[in-house]
């Protein structure tokens, strides 16, 4: 069966194991059902996730023009401490920025390759942890806007990592950690503006991914250069497809590519 569409990050269901869906405009693929099956992918074009034009993808699924112009790619997306909607101050589109920034946000600890701190909208829990390939996570602060979450993350980055080692995550080279203990250790470093939002009494969330075989030496597929690839799918973790020959393909990093998938 042949499918064709523009890549966007896989949609997920928080079940055991996590369920993954690759969604196109008029169809979708339940990726879990493809485990241990051969998949052929071919690059056939580009489609900017904002303007929809067939233009080279620059970053985050956007063409260069949209990346620098559209509010969906503002600096505050990756650096929440730069949020200004709470001050009624516009970056690119104040109405959009208020909609996204002025809602409950979570500062969390997640363990995918190591314990890291991160920020997400409350509505994106546990989706954000799934996308990062975390096998355990816990909320530590719930604040009313993105700015407060951002300054909390910045303060805690001095004491805990803020990046995931994607190779360790994919190799499953991980150790269980006591995230409740980590949360208590970090409490004193939370900024004064956010201290009242500290969460005292929750427990860890555990996640299980549909992986039959972890790669020993993951080799990242660059479909823009290789144009075509075929392999047997043996796992899905984070937003990565894992193949039997140790090839891994990051769906999220390839958003905006138009692909043909032959199953």
Image (cartoon, rainbow, N blue to C red):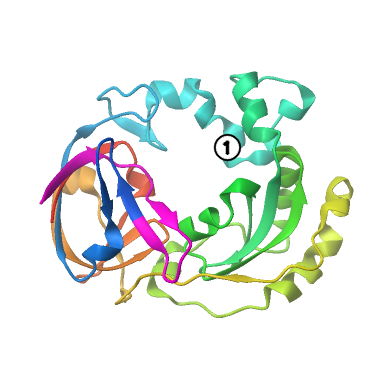
From what the image shows, is residue 106 above or below residue 113? above
Q: Is residue 58 left or right of residue 193?
A: left
Q: Is residue 159 left or right of residue 79?
A: right
Which residue lies at the image location 76% right of the left edge and 29% below the top edge? 86
Residue 40 position within the rendered picture, expressed as x and y whole percent measured from the top left:
13, 55
Residue 198 position within the rendered picture, expressed as x and y whole percent measured from the top left:
82, 57
Which residue lies at the image location 48% right of the left edge and 24% below the top edge? 68
| Disc 1, SS | helix
- Name the quadrant containing residue 33: bottom left
User: Magenta residues, as a range?
Assistant: 1-20
Q: Nearer the viewer, residue 37 or 65?
A: 37
- Name the quadrant containing residue 204: bottom right
Residue 247 position within the rendered picture, expressed as x and y whole percent measured from the top left:
24, 64
Residue 8 is inside the magenta segment: yes
Q: Could you classify mark 1 by the number of other residues whose Cα lies within 10 Å: few (under 14), some (14-19), or many (20 or more)? A: some
Q: Is residue 16 left or right of residue 152?
A: left
From what the image shows, is residue 145 above or below residue 22? above
Can you identify the residue that label 1 sits on?
A: 77
Which residue lies at the image location 58% right of the left edge and 33% below the top edge? 75
Residue 84 position within the rendered picture, expressed as x and y whole percent measured from the top left:
72, 28
Q: Is residue 49 visible?
A: yes
Which residue lies at the image location 37% right of the left edge and 50% below the top edge? 10
Q: Nearer the viewer, residue 220 or 33?
A: 33
Residue 13 is inside the magenta segment: yes
Quadrant containing the C terminus is bottom left
């Amino acid at each position: 069966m042949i499918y064709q569409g523009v890549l966007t990050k896989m949609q997920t269901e928080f079940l055991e194991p996590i369920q993954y869906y690759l969604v196109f405009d008029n169809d979708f693929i339940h990726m879990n059902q493809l485990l241990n099956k051969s998949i052929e992918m071919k690059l056939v074009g580009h489609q900017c996730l904002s303007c929809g034009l067939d233009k080279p993808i620059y970053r985050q699924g956007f063409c260069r023009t949209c990346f620098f112009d559209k509010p969906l790619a503002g600096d505050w997306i990756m650096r929440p401490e730069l949020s200004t909607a709470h001050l009624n101050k516009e970056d690119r589109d104040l109405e959009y920025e208020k909609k996204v920034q002025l809602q409950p946000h979570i500062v969390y600890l997640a363990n995918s390759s190591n314990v890291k701190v991160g920020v997400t909208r409350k509505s994106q829990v546990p989706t954000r942890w799934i996308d990062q390939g975390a096998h355990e996570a816990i909320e530590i602060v719930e604040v009313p806007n993105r700015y407060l979450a951002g300054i909390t993350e910045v303060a805690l980055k001095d004491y805990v990592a803020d990046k995931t080692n994607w190779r360790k995550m994919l190799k499953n080279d991980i150790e269980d950690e006591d995230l409740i203990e980590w949360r208590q250790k970090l409490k004193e470093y939370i900024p004064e503006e956010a201290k009242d939002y500290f969460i005292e009494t929750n427990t860890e969330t555990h996640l299980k991914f549909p992986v039959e075989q972890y790669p020993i030496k993951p080799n990242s597929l660059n479909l823009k250069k290789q144009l075509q690839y075929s392999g047997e799918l043996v796992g899905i973790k984070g937003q990565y497809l894992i193949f039997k020959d140790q090839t891994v393909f990051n769906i999220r990093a390839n958003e905006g590519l138009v692909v043909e998938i032959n199953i």
